[in-house]
Image (cartoon, coloured by chain):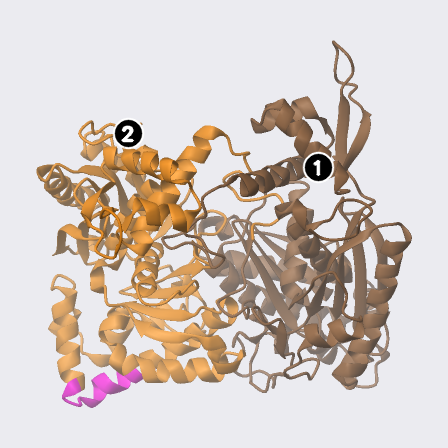
Chain colours: A orange, B brown
């Protein structure tokens, strides 16, 4: 429940007039078909309480905007003339997510049904390049994705940039990304210039927030999860949190800086300059330093991280003691910090992302033990640990979904099919 | 923004029909008058976009239900016949909050305008009584508050119980309250029996959640805060969190167990049986053990906590070294755990409640230093530390407000004036 005084977006409540009522009902019908699958106009009317004439008019408008389309005949109908099902139109509208991370760039375009239209990931040692060069490279990948959407006659609903750092929500500026070595960068302005002032909206968000957004969608395909914490394991460690179906961002958009919880007072110096941050004992660098020598090629950030992790897995499967000890220590530290998050947030699910997901089989047991031991709520508060299956595409998928979310909230942001003009 | 699939309460969205539209508009008008003060029907119509005839009908219904009343003539009106202002009716409807804590019971009734109708707090060494006896005593205080509401011809909108422990949201059961020594207690059922099966709804919530609810209302009187963390300092330490105007509860309602963050691995054994929990270094017991000897009367839980704290303040003001050292240490530990919360949640405000508020002048400097040093976001993420001015009434005020919130969301839960029957 929104408390007294309402939400940041104006929660005193706006009385429903006929325009907002229509927009609300367009959104209800579009989300209904998305969540429950293809169905007839009569069924939508029965399910939503709207009258049939209104539903027909709403569906016609959504078809005109390229968001719904006529589907197959309704085979479940026993009597009378067969009804026509309507379904999400996957051809018209796409969201794009684009990520800068410490050792790769990635871009994904998803259509309205969530299918992948375009996906690229390239290794890049971004920590040793200047921001301008890295953004040039990312802009190139975004242009390729937009071209792929154009080539199928689609419209880009928006592009969301994922960055491993502090993003100020209201201005869209990156304030600090210690592991990239970036200070303040006006990423939206920089990217808008590189893309030639595009007509679609651009947003920027923390990569862990976006990965949590993507994990939420994945989990909800099989169960009605409402509260989750996602941990992104890379050189840095980020947290993305969904509570009661809402992404948590904090007052200025800086929430989820779990990598800098001071849990290891005797620990190593962090990229942020402090000592004892959680990521100094659970980040990928911590694992590699404990498990390998300095000249070991698995430490080389110019090599693809998946190949380097495959080598770690091979050593663990071969029973290499130094690797196994390092994995167990990282799993225990993961549980010490994880228990703090579970005590504070009581998520239904703790989702392991990034390298934590890849090495999950070795990390989970010490992690789960630490949570059982250190969380005060009975049975760890009911929290389960799961591995994300989205790999390193989680943040870009979440970015594409955030770009599409606005279409589901207000379908009128998309112009009628063929015009390509947002209304 | 609610993510794909919506909120726990059914976020796929319900299409607006005429009944729900009317209910929504009643809520809009009622909250409009609450938030912006007395105003004319014409002004309400202009502000909300509703037409004047609709506003007149909505106001008439809200007056009939005892929620609004005719106020003074509109003195701001220069031309034409004077308009009549409508204002919240403080006489009709009250919410009640009732708290069991380790060393006191408290009950408050607030009317719809937030004014206090009834308030009681009595010291009680609840940790050494059985739950039944304590609930008997609390039921007596609730009956007094209800009688005070009855005596002025009012209606009780609901009673919310505050407990210092884990509350399962969906069943309303207390699962565990280590500092009370209570295990599973079906508090709603027990209290409903003691109150003779009352017609008003009963709820139970964690005391820190309710204190956060109350702090949110207090802060919003002067600034548009949307994200806060409240810390309740008593024998135990609880956390209540509001994010983007929503109270965070977690998947099972167990969120905010900040007192059991494992921050002091070398620390004392906690009431929960674990070692090193945050409350073992910042709870009231930790302060008293460091600042006093065993036979010092300030340790006596049967004495009113405010009197005991007044003695601590007197010693600090007199410069007593042991007291000052203890306060500084507690402030530093408060900052170590506080920085974790600020890194994770990025609140606009960290609110000190309970004994932390009373001793705030001695705790704040080391606390703020620790936050500045340990929070990665620039300028502590913009988080300010403030002392709650609600004292030990925060949780009961929040409980009363939660009981009233439902009336503002759906004014039709209150029957028409005089009938006393919810519709």
Residue farthest to the left, as pictured:
A151
Image x and y of residue A100, in percent: 23, 51
Q: Is residue B5 above or below residue A313?
A: above
* Magenta-span inclusion, residue A319: yes
As drawn, B79 above or below A314: above
Q: Residue at x 51, y 70 (%)?
A: B252
Tell which residue pokes out farthest to the top in this image. Answer: B79
Where residue B90 appears, x then y in whole percent? 80, 43
- Give the image location of residue B215, x and y in percent: 67, 53
Q: Report which quarter residue A307 is drawn in.
A: bottom left
Residue nearest the viewer, comparing A6 with B91: B91
Residue A387 lies in quadrant:
bottom left
Q: Exactly how many numbered labels are in the figure?
A: 2
Q: Secondary structure at mark 2?
A: loop
Q: Is residue A171 visible?
A: no
Q: Residue furthest front?
A: A80
At horizontal 39% and vertical 44% (from top left) the residue drawn is A28
Question: Does the magenta-highlighted stretch encompass residue B411?
Answer: no
Find numbered disc 1 in the image and state the secondary structure of the residue it sits on: helix
- Residue depicted at 28% across the width and 34% down the height: A60
Horizontal arrangement in the rendering, residue B22 relative to residue A253 (left or right): right
On screen, residue A124 versus residue B6, left or right, reads left
Residue A422 is at least partly visible in this image: yes
Crowding near pointer 1: few (<14 within 10 Å), some, many (20+)? some
Give the residue pinned by disc 2.
A422
Residue placed under numbered mark 1 in the picture: B61
Task: Please state which of residues B38 and B84 is positioned toward the viewer in this rendering.
Answer: B84
- Report the magenta residues as a range: A317-329
Left or right of B406 on screen, residue B155: right
């Amino acid at each position: 429940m929104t408390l007294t005084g309402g939400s940041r977006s104006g929660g005193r409540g706006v009385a429903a007039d006929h325009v907002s009522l229509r927009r609300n009902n367009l959104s209800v019908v579009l989300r209904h078909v998305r969540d429950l699958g293809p169905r007839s106009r009569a069924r939508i009317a029965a399910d939503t309480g709207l009258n049939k004439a209104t539903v027909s008019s709403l569906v016609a408008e959504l078809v005109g905007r390229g968001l719904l389309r006529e589907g197959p005949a309704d085979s479940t109908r026993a009597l009378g003339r067969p009804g026509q099902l309507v379904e999400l139109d996957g051809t018209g509208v796409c969201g794009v997510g684009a990520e800068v991370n410490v050792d790769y760039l990635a871009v994904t375009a998803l259509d309205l049904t969530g299918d992948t239209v375009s996906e690229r990931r390239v290794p890049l040692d971004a920590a040793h390049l200047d921001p301008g060069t890295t953004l040039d490279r990312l802009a190139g990948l975004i242009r390729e994705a937009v071209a792929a959407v154009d080539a199928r006659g689609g419209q880009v609903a928006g592009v969301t940039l994922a960055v491993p750092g502090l993003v100020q929500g209201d201005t869209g500026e990156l304030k600090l990304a210690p592991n990239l070595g970036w200070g303040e960068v006006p990423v939206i302005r920089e990217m808008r210039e590189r893309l030639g002032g595009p007509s679609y909206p651009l947003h920027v968000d923390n990569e862990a927030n976006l990965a949590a957004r993507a994990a939420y969608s994945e989990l909800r395909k099989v169960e009605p999860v409402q509260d989750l914490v996602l941990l992104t394991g890379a050189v840095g460690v980020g947290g993305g949190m969904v509570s009661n179906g809402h992404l948590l961002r904090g007052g200025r958009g800086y929430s989820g800086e779990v990598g800098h919880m001071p849990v290891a007072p005797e620990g190593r110096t962090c990229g942020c300059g402090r000592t004892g941050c959680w990521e100094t004992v659970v980040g990928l660098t911590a694992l590699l330093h404990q498990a390998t020598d300095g000249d070991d090629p698995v430490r080389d950030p110019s090599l693809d991280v998946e190949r380097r992790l495959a080598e770690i897995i091979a050593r663990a499967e071969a029973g290499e003691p130094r690797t196994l000890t390092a994995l167990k220590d990282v799993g225990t530290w993961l549980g010490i910090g994880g228990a703090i998050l579970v005590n504070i947030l009581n998520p239904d699910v703790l989702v392991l992302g990034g390298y934590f997901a890849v090495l999950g089989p070795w990390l989970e047991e010490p992690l789960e033990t630490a949570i059982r031991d250190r969380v005060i709520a009975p049975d760890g508060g009911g929290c389960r640990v799961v591995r994300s299956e989205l790999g390193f595409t989680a943040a870009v998928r979440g970015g594409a979904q955030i770009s599409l979310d606005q279409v589901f909230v207000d379908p009128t942001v998309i112009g009628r099919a063929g015009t390509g003009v947002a209304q």
